[in-house]
Amino acid sequence: MTKKRNRTRPALSLQERLDKFTRDARAAARKLPPGAERHAMLQKVRDGEAAAEMERVLSSPGPHDPK
């Protein structure tokens, strides 16, 4: 007998989850003293912002020309 997978949809859209991640990561970075850990957290913020921008471009209607 095979088990049925429990498939649920996320409560928030991908765009909303990426925005929340970047807000939370930026807030966490503000609390850190300058150093390697803060730098790594800010890099995650930049990665999240880039992913959000890619998602916006790819989900928009119309042609997807590179800038």
Image (cartoon, rainbow, N blue to C red):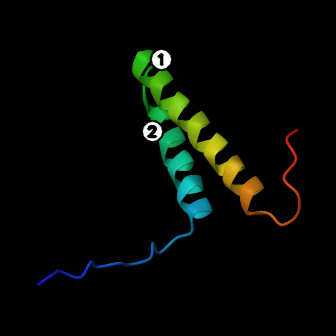
Q: Position of residue 6 (x, y in %)?
A: 28, 79
Q: Identify the residue under disc 2.
A: 28
The quadrant of the image that shows the C terminus is top right
Is 5 rendered above or below residue 57?
Answer: below
Find numbered disc 2 in the image and state the secondary structure of the residue it sits on. helix
The answer to which image quadrant residue 57 occupies is bottom right
Q: Residue at x 51, y 35 (%)?
A: 44
**Residue under the point 54% across and 29% down:** 43
| Residue ranking furthest to the left | 1
**Side of 48 where 28 appears, left or right:** left
Percent x, y for residue 65?
88, 47
Residue 46: which quarter of the image?
top right
Between 32 and 9, the one nearer to me in the picture: 9
Q: Which residue is mark 1?
A: 34
- The residue under the point 84% across, 53% down is 64
Report x, y in % for residue 41.
47, 31
Q: Amino acid at mark 1?
A: Pro
Above or below 32: residue 57? below
Q: Quadrant of the N terminus?
A: bottom left
Q: Is residue 39 above or below residue 60?
A: above
